[in-house]
Image: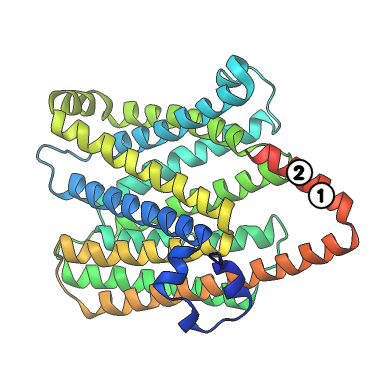
């Protein structure tokens, strides 16, 4: 009779690395599921990144239609969240006829910030290369921590501040490297990136407020923020004059339209895979896979789309990876602490904890 060994139990018990043979891992159904989800996440996100960079730098006829790319991406998430609400609440949920848990004003602000964050995040590719942009976007941790401390009154560890400082250093090194290596470097990209990071940090904290303080479901928050965010992006497309030529370009080129849809679809698959990893294996596992994804994206960008070399790129990438490793350790430690507290609560209040856990699980589906 086969003995199934839980990979998570081995990790918790501090088993030596020799215990994690390929045969042992493949025998564990939970481990196999984690590997499949991780592979789906990494592959889909890398395909999405490669397609996106190809569209920006190599697609013939692409004339900086960045807001259109953001519109399609938001559309995938809006439609998917509405489909889930249809399954859960019927037509009323699909057409958002039910009163939302969080205030309308909060969702309007979230949508504005999300639309600006997604759109400006794409516009920065007009001024910065893909690798630099990936690193700079990761610096969202810095304003997120500041807002968490000043507004939400969250406690932040020293290790998190160290990781944030390394991300700032990494972003500066990558930007200086691009300035030295690319004669056409335009600092406007850094200004837009700074505004985008602020919008993303504010949107993330407001989403946390909607979920935790108002008890909104994830699908409700996604439906309102992404759906209304599309309106924000559409207005930006009209103001910038991008809407008509972008529509004409993608409708006249099946190849370009296919790339755009495939890029957004693979990004969506990656997001769904990461959500499944978080739900089934915890935040620590999701953070580890996410860390690997970001580092791999930067490396593949340099390998597949050659860029002028500068030593600052190497130093910036090293600082970036180190920051991710530190943040991974912080997330893992926080997860372990939460498990200890949860186990203690189970020992003291087994019945009450069981009921609460059941309700939360039902709401999160």
Give the label on residue 237, or none.
Answer: none
What residue do we see at 56% from left, 68% from top?
5
Quick one: SS at disc 1?
Answer: helix
Image coordinates of residue 35 in percent, x first then y, are: 42, 59
Q: Is residue 318 at all visible to an observer of this figure?
A: yes
Quick one: SS at disc 2?
Answer: helix
If the image is split into quadrants, where does the C terminus sit?
Answer: top right
Image coordinates of residue 205 in percent, x first then y, are: 61, 50
Q: Is residue 290 above or below residue 164?
A: above
What residue do we see at 59% from left, 70% from top?
332
If the image is split into quadrants, where does the N terminus sit?
Answer: bottom right
The image quarter containing residue 251 is: top left
For the residue carrying disc 2, how many other residues have a C-alpha within 10 Å: few (<14), some (14-19), or many (20+)?
A: few
Between the residue at mark 1 and the residue at mark 2, the CA separation in whole angstroms equals 6 Å
Q: Is residue 26 left or right of residue 348?
A: left
Give the label on residue 354, or none.
Answer: 1
Q: From the image, tell me which residue sits under label 2.
A: 358
For the residue carrying disc 1, how many other residues have a C-alpha within 10 Å: few (<14), some (14-19), or many (20+)?
A: few
Q: Which residue is situated farthest in the front direction here?
A: 1
Q: Is residue 16 left or right of residue 294?
A: right
Marks 1 and 2 close (CB-CB < 8 Å): yes
């Amino acid at each position: 009779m086969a003995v199934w060994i839980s990979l998570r139990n081995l990790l918790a018990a501090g088993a030596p690395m020799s215990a994690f043979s390929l045969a042992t891992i493949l025998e564990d159904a939970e481990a196999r599921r984690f590997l499949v989800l991780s592979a789906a996440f990494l592959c889909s996100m890398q395909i999405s990144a490669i397609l996106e960079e190809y569209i920006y730098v190599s697609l013939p006829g692409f004339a900086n239609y960045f807001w259109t790319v953001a519109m399609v991406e938001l559309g995938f998430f809006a439609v998917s969240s509405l489909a889930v609400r249809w399954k859960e609440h019927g037509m009323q949920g699909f057409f958002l006829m039910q009163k939302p848990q969080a205030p309308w004003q909060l969702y309007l602000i979230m949508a504005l910030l999300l639309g600006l964050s997604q759109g400006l995040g794409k516009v920065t590719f007009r001024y910065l290369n893909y690798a630099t942009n990936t690193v700079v976007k990761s610096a969202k941790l810095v304003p997120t921590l500041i807002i968490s401390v000043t507004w939400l009154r969250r406690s932040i560890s020293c290790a998190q501040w160290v990781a944030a400082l390394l991300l700032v250093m990494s972003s500066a090194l990558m930007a200086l490297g691009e300035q030295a290596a690319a004669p056409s470097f335009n600092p406007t990209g850094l200004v837009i990136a700074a505004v985008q990071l602020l919008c993303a940090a504010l949107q993330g904290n407001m989403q946390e407020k909607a979920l935790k303080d108002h008890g909104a479901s994830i699908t409700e928050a996604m439906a309102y923020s992404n759906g209304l965010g599309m309106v924000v992006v559409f207005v930006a497309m009209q103001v910038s004059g991008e809407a008509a030529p972008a529509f004409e370009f993608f409708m006249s080129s099946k190849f370009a339209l296919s790339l755009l849809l495939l890029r957004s679809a693979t990004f969506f698959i990656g997001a769904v895979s990461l959500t499944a990893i978080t739900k089934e294996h915890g935040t620590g596992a999701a953070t580890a896979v996410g860390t690997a994804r970001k580092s791999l994206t930067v490396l593949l960008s340099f390998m597949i789309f050659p860029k002028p070399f500068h030593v600052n790129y190497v130093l910036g990438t090293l600082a970036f990876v180190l920051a991710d490793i530190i943040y991974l350790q912080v997330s893992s430690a926080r997860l372990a602490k939460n498990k200890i507290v949860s186990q203690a609560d189970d020992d003291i209040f087994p019945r009450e904890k069981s009921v609460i856990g059941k309700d939360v699980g039902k709401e999160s589906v």
